[in-house]
Image: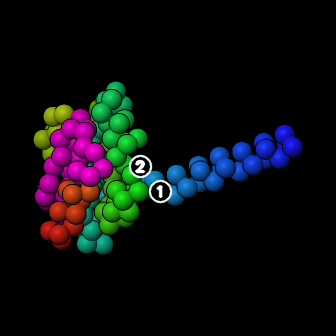
Protein backbone atom coordinates (compact mmCIF):
# COMPACT_ATOMS: atom_id res chain seq x y z
CA UNK A 1 0.00 0.00 0.00
CA UNK A 2 2.85 2.39 0.80
CA UNK A 3 4.44 1.70 -2.55
CA UNK A 4 1.12 2.40 -4.32
CA UNK A 5 0.78 5.75 -2.51
CA UNK A 6 4.37 6.67 -3.33
CA UNK A 7 3.86 5.87 -7.02
CA UNK A 8 0.59 7.81 -7.08
CA UNK A 9 2.23 10.79 -5.41
CA UNK A 10 5.13 10.70 -7.88
CA UNK A 11 2.69 10.59 -10.80
CA UNK A 12 0.79 13.57 -9.43
CA UNK A 13 4.01 15.54 -9.04
CA UNK A 14 5.11 14.70 -12.59
CA UNK A 15 1.68 15.60 -14.00
CA UNK A 16 1.59 18.91 -12.10
CA UNK A 17 5.13 19.80 -13.19
CA UNK A 18 4.36 18.96 -16.82
CA UNK A 19 1.16 21.02 -16.80
CA UNK A 20 3.01 23.96 -15.28
CA UNK A 21 5.74 23.69 -17.93
CA UNK A 22 3.14 23.48 -20.68
CA UNK A 23 1.66 26.75 -19.46
CA UNK A 24 4.95 28.60 -19.16
CA UNK A 25 5.57 31.58 -21.40
CA UNK A 26 8.12 30.82 -24.09
CA UNK A 27 10.74 33.50 -23.47
CA UNK A 28 13.53 34.49 -25.80
CA UNK A 29 16.58 36.27 -24.40
CA UNK A 30 17.81 38.27 -27.38
CA UNK A 31 15.77 41.38 -28.17
CA UNK A 32 17.39 41.87 -31.58
CA UNK A 33 16.45 38.34 -32.60
CA UNK A 34 12.95 38.77 -31.16
CA UNK A 35 12.46 41.92 -33.23
CA UNK A 36 13.57 40.09 -36.38
CA UNK A 37 11.12 37.30 -35.65
CA UNK A 38 8.33 39.80 -34.92
CA UNK A 39 8.99 41.58 -38.20
CA UNK A 40 8.77 38.34 -40.13
CA UNK A 41 5.58 37.20 -38.41
CA UNK A 42 3.92 40.60 -38.02
CA UNK A 43 3.64 39.97 -34.27
CA UNK A 44 4.04 42.45 -31.42
CA UNK A 45 6.85 42.04 -28.90
CA UNK A 46 6.51 41.92 -25.12
CA UNK A 47 9.92 42.72 -23.62
CA UNK A 48 10.31 42.22 -19.86
CA UNK A 49 13.23 44.26 -18.50
CA UNK A 50 14.20 42.77 -15.15
CA UNK A 51 17.13 42.30 -12.78
CA UNK A 52 18.09 39.26 -10.72
CA UNK A 53 17.94 41.27 -7.47
CA UNK A 54 14.45 42.71 -8.09
CA UNK A 55 11.79 41.28 -5.76
CA UNK A 56 8.90 42.68 -7.80
CA UNK A 57 10.36 41.04 -10.91
CA UNK A 58 10.28 37.69 -9.14
CA UNK A 59 6.67 38.33 -8.05
CA UNK A 60 5.77 39.18 -11.67
CA UNK A 61 7.27 35.85 -12.76
CA UNK A 62 5.60 33.79 -10.05
CA UNK A 63 2.16 35.44 -9.93
CA UNK A 64 1.39 37.27 -13.16
CA UNK A 65 3.22 35.30 -15.85
CA UNK A 66 1.99 32.02 -14.37
CA UNK A 67 -1.66 33.02 -14.90
CA UNK A 68 -3.28 30.79 -17.53
CA UNK A 69 -4.99 33.62 -19.42
CA UNK A 70 -1.75 35.65 -19.51
CA UNK A 71 0.00 32.54 -20.84
CA UNK A 72 -2.67 32.08 -23.48
CA UNK A 73 -2.35 35.71 -24.65
CA UNK A 74 1.44 35.50 -24.64
CA UNK A 75 1.24 33.16 -27.62
CA UNK A 76 0.21 36.15 -29.74
CA UNK A 77 3.46 37.96 -28.87
CA UNK A 78 7.15 37.38 -29.30
CA UNK A 79 8.14 37.38 -25.62
CA UNK A 80 11.65 38.31 -24.57
CA UNK A 81 13.28 38.74 -21.16
CA UNK A 82 16.07 41.28 -20.94
CA UNK A 83 18.37 41.29 -17.90
CA UNK A 84 18.90 45.02 -17.53
CA UNK A 85 22.10 44.57 -15.51
CA UNK A 86 23.64 42.66 -18.43
CA UNK A 87 22.02 44.83 -21.13
CA UNK A 88 22.18 48.32 -19.63
CA UNK A 89 22.59 49.81 -23.12
CA UNK A 90 19.23 48.37 -24.20
CA UNK A 91 17.58 49.46 -20.97
CA UNK A 92 18.87 52.99 -21.59
CA UNK A 93 17.70 52.94 -25.20
CA UNK A 94 14.13 52.21 -24.07
CA UNK A 95 14.21 54.58 -21.10
CA UNK A 96 13.96 51.84 -18.49
CA UNK A 97 14.59 53.34 -15.06
CA UNK A 98 12.77 50.95 -12.75
CA UNK A 99 12.12 47.24 -12.54
CA UNK A 100 10.23 45.43 -13.72
CA UNK A 101 9.39 47.34 -16.88
CA UNK A 102 7.47 45.69 -19.69
CA UNK A 103 7.89 47.34 -23.09
CA UNK A 104 5.45 46.46 -25.86
CA UNK A 105 6.71 47.00 -29.39
CA UNK A 106 4.91 46.60 -32.68
CA UNK A 107 6.33 44.35 -35.39
CA UNK A 108 8.33 47.33 -36.72
CA UNK A 109 10.06 47.78 -33.36
CA UNK A 110 8.23 50.96 -32.30
CA UNK A 111 7.25 51.27 -28.62
CA UNK A 112 3.46 51.20 -28.35
CA UNK A 113 2.97 50.68 -24.62
CA UNK A 114 5.01 50.58 -21.42
CA UNK A 115 4.21 49.14 -17.99
CA UNK A 116 6.51 50.29 -15.20
CA UNK A 117 6.48 48.30 -11.97
CA UNK A 118 4.60 45.22 -10.89
CA UNK A 119 1.26 44.51 -12.57
CA UNK A 120 -1.18 41.76 -11.68
CA UNK A 121 -2.62 39.34 -14.23
CA UNK A 122 -5.79 41.37 -14.84
CA UNK A 123 -3.81 44.55 -15.47
CA UNK A 124 -1.37 42.82 -17.79
CA UNK A 125 -4.18 41.13 -19.75
CA UNK A 126 -5.80 44.54 -20.31
CA UNK A 127 -2.55 45.97 -21.62
CA UNK A 128 -1.84 42.93 -23.79
CA UNK A 129 -5.32 43.12 -25.34
CA UNK A 130 -4.88 46.86 -25.92
CA UNK A 131 -1.61 46.22 -27.77
CA UNK A 132 -3.20 43.46 -29.84
CA UNK A 133 -5.94 45.91 -30.91
CA UNK A 134 -3.24 48.24 -32.28
CA UNK A 135 -1.92 45.58 -34.67
Q: Is residue 11 above or below residue 53?
A: below
**Where is residue 19 shown, x and y percent of the image?**
55, 55
Any magenta on residue 100?
Answer: yes
Q: Point out the stretch of residues depicted in magenta.
A: 99-124
The quarter in which the C terminus is drawn is bottom left
Q: Is residue 112 above or below residue 29?
A: below
Any magenta on residue 111?
Answer: yes
Q: Which mark is residue 53?
A: none
Left or right of 17 in this view: 1: right
Residue 42, picture quadrant: bottom left
Which residue lies under the disc numbered 1?
23
Q: Nearer the viewer, residue 27 or 118?
A: 118
Helix, strand or loop under label 1: helix
**Where is residue 74 shown, x and y percent of the image?**
34, 60
Residue 134, picture quadrant: bottom left
Q: Nearer the viewer, residue 27 or 129?
A: 129
Q: Residue at x 37, y 43 (%)?
A: 63
Which residue lies under the disc numbered 2?
66
Residue 82, picture quadrant: top left
Amino acid sequence: MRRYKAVLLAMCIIFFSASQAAQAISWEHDLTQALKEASGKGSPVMADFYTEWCGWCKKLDSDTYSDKSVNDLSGKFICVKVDADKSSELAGKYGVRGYPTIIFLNSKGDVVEKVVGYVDAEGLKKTMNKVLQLK
